[in-house]
Amino acid sequence: MKISNPFLITGVLIALLIGLGGPVYTQVKYEKESQIKVEDVPAKALSFIKDCHIDAPLRWYREGNVNDASVEAKGRIRGSKYSIEFDTLGNIQDVEFIMDFDEMLQAIRGKVKYHLDSLFKRYKIIKVQKQYTAESQTLQQLIRSGQSNQPFTTRYEIVMAGKKEKMMKKFEMLINSNGEIIKQTRIIPKDMDNLIY
Amino acid sequence: MKMFAQDFYETGLLPKFNINTSINELWELNAKSETKVTFLEGNFGGYRQQELLHQRTELAFAAERKTTYNSSLAGGYLIRFHNKKPAHRLFQQYSIVSSYATFKLGHRFSADQTFKTGGANEYRLRYRISTALPLEGTQIDPTESYLKFNNEYLGGLQEKEYNLEIRALAAIGKNIGNNQKVEAGLNYRIGKVFQESVDHEFWLYLAFYLNT
């Protein structure tokens, strides 16, 4: 079939792409993570990192939407991937780093396994993050050396896939230092139709 | 890739529309249209024809069942309109998308069977690997742009003759909100690999994905 005007077809296609894409864009607010320059990081957060006395290169990110945002420093410290989270004023919120499930203390790991066994027919651990919350100076000690004699709270965030009924679903479990599940959140994966179709 | 005088080439536009609808937690329906519009074709020996031709349009419908949070099985039917003789295709696929720290990796294994009046049936096995990389941060958030690459291998059997086709795509995409994506890029396809006369296709790829 011969087509007389190529620009008409291209124009219609582009108009369709833009036209269909427009309305939904304006209706919803979305979470977003984007890398930011050091100049855009709150001074208080930079000062916290400086006082940690670590020489690891860090990347800075801003996460969230206009109502609820945070600033995060990410980098490899003493061989582990760390994420240090601040509020937008630069006040430290928590410190997290990725670890292997097998690196958890055996007593805690045993309890976590017991709870997961009772919740799921089968499951697979995808990612474990250890999370510290404490006073600013205590967190600096923990970042610097991995230990502190001051009080701090330890929690674990476990991303896992588990099967309760028909299929494996993805969850995030918040675990306290006794190995008990204190929060269970279902993770709905983003649609990746463009990698399938 | 060395090109010979008798090798055939085709260039044009490859617009694609893809809609996915969730029925429930396990099932999704997919509808897709893809059109090939040729701008220029010829061979590397000097023959060329510059004309805008609608080469074909395909409409496909599939039912997809999630097998886990990141994998699914799908099967469907495709009809291809080409030279007033429609071809009919059945297809089956298994796909899995893995998430890594800064990118996603999708694998698609599929089979299809094509039937057309006055032509031999064709049977193909296909494998495609795709990746999407965020242009900002470590994940592709709503409203963010990304790069997409894929590479597909298609082994075909028609009238006792085997054929291999290889496709590659490099595109830039943008999330428009949570459920729409637009992509534009270049799609290269090489067909009849290992045969005397090879087909090279260069397409300007435009795609729109909607998830409802």
Image (spheres, rainbow, N blue to C red):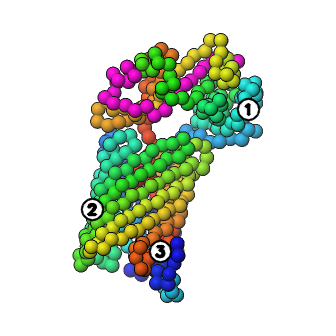
Residue A144 visible in the current orientation: yes
Q: Measure how far apart labels 3 and 2 are at the Cα level.
A: 26 Å
Q: Please name whichever residue, B13 or A83, is drawn nearer the observer in this view of the structure.
A: A83
Q: Is residue A13 above or below residue B83?
A: above
Q: Position of residue A142 (x, y in %)?
A: 65, 21
> Do marks 1 and 3 share a chain?
no
Q: Is residue A159 above or below residue A195?
A: above
Q: Position of residue B187 (x, y in %)?
A: 49, 66
Three-letter amino acid code at the position of disc 1:
Asp
Front disc: 2 or 1: 1
* Image mark for residue B200: 3
Q: In this view, does A118 lie above or below B1?
A: above
Residue A171, image quadrant: top left
- Chain of the residue on which disc 2 is drawn: B
Neighbour class for label 3 at 10 Å: few (<14), some, many (≥20)? many
Question: Residue sitting at 23 percent across and 76 percent down?
Answer: B117
